[in-house]
Amino acid sequence: MKLTKLALHWQIAIAMVIGAGIGLPLNILAENGTIEVETARSVAGYGKSVGDVFLRLLTMIVVPLILTSIVSGVTSTGSLQGLGRMGGLTIVYYLSTSLVAICIGLLLVNIIQPGVGADLVALEASAAADAPVVQPEVLAGGSLGQTLWAQLMNLIPKNPWAAIADPNNRSILAVIFFGILFGIFVVKVGGKAGKTLSEFFAASFEIMMAMTMFLIRLAPIGVLGFMIYATAGKGLGVFAALGMYMLTVFLALLIHALIVLPMLLKFLARRSPIAFARNMSPALLTAFSTASSNGTLPLTITCAEKRAGISNRVSSFVLPLGATINMDGTALYEAVAVLFIAQAYGNDLAFAQQVIVAITALVASIGAAGIPHAGTVMMVVVLNAVGLPIEAVGLILAVDRILDMCRTSINVWSDSVATAVISRFTHGGTVGGGEEESASG
């Protein structure tokens, strides 16, 4: 069978295995001194370059896809009835699942206590090689109230065209807000103008989806590059001092991904978790390899609509919003990381301080951009909230890439589950041709 005839998720899975098969031996050979470390890092760099091209192509279509998707989703109903209900349920879902994820993380970090007895000398040695990739002005600021206010202000663009044209896609929340508002007034104005704009955005969205489907065919190549980068670029030695910390994060993420979210699918959405995960697998695998929920968004929307049968009315609203504010994996990771750092420094945080960590991690995760390492940048807000040194972020950066990949896939998985849950409770329904119906019977 030709590889091109395999289902997309199998192509991506094979690419991940090949990438790891290339990168891990290079890494081991470099650790043993058989080859130069720079050789392995050079190959990792080439892999990253290939992956970056794919991610850049996806990033290129994120804003136009979000804008056309949201406006067409709002205008396609012909009325505004139910939009407020959908928005309210979506926000409640996102805040609830993120809070549950944080509680799971806090519970496990208190049980396992990965930072107690941690070798600070080894941690600081690895931190020296992985200095924080955040700007000083970011590290210096950020109380809980300031962070929350900043996100509320970011919701309203000073100039919507500037937000749309932002080359770094840092204004996605503003694009979503403007798109919803624009769609609402297209419906309210109605008439010939409303009909013309509705047809224009519907046609534009159809074209953007066609472009997305074309670019998605390149996903296995991009995933291959990122897996080579992830496996060849880091020495295995840096994981030793952070082994228990990584184990704690992994276990917490697994509990949330394999127990909490499937229960929501089973009992709230009334869907088969296995079938739904299979339908969303291309997006989940891509999220894992790229560590970018924003970059994966075009693929997430495509999988939700074309494979899982979620209607555009639901997916166009829930998924772009989720890629911006719903960061279950990031929130969990930030809570675990802060308590690990506190334990490593011998600072046993009281229950009240852990509550502050939970609330601050929730707010900070909402503000985290859907890009690689964004959670690390926002963690300084949580550290500030409990009086821990912000320089301690460097202690965990040595293993941040692999954890970033894991938490991003959880973020996308939670967004995907949200579409199924919100669809059922708002009667958003499914569209014909989705694989979910046939898969679950």
Image (cartoon, rainbow, N blue to C red):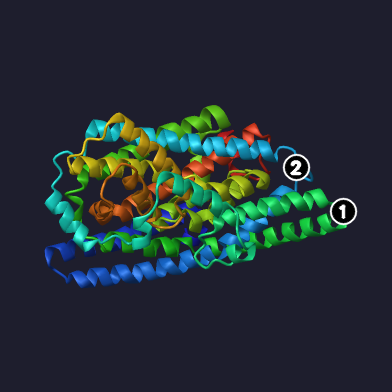
Any part of residue 101 in sight: yes
**What is the secondary structure assignment of the residue under circle 1?**
helix
Is residue 228 in view?
no
Q: Earlier in the sequence, mark 2 or mark 1?
A: 2
Which quarter of the figure has residue 245?
top left
In screen coordinates, is 411 left or right of 26?
right
Q: Position of residue 69 (x, y in %)?
A: 65, 54
| Residue under pointer 2 | 80
Q: Is residue 168 above or below residue 379?
A: below
- The answer to which of 157 and 321 lies nearer the viewer is 157
Q: Residues within 10 Å of mark 1 (few under 14, many from 20)?
A: few
Eyeballing the image, is 41 above or below 86? below
Q: Position of residue 10 (x, y in %)?
A: 45, 53
Q: Quadrant of residue 372?
A: bottom left
Residue 203, picture quadrant: bottom right
Q: Mark 2 falls on what kind of element?
A: loop
Horizontally, residue 8 falls left or right of residue 107, namely: right
Relative vertical location of residue 211 with respect to residue 367 in this rendering, above or below: below
Classify 416 as above or below 51: above
Out of 82 and 202, give the one closest to the viewer: 82
Residue drawn where x is 36% and y is 33% of the image: 355
Question: Which quadrant: the C terminus?
Answer: top right
Given the image, on which type of amino acid does mark 2 rest?
Leu
Image point 64% across, 43% down: which residue? 314
Q: As shown in the figure, which amino acid type bears the numbered disc 1?
A: Gly
Mark 1, residue position: 191
13, 159: nearer the viewer = 159
Q: CA distance from mark 2 to mark 1?
A: 15 Å
Q: Position of residue 110 (x, y in %)?
A: 26, 32
- Sort mark 2 into few (<14), some (14-19) or many (20+) by Cα contacts within 10 Å: some
Q: Is residue 417 left or right of residue 394?
A: right
Residue 366 location (% of width, % of height)? 47, 46
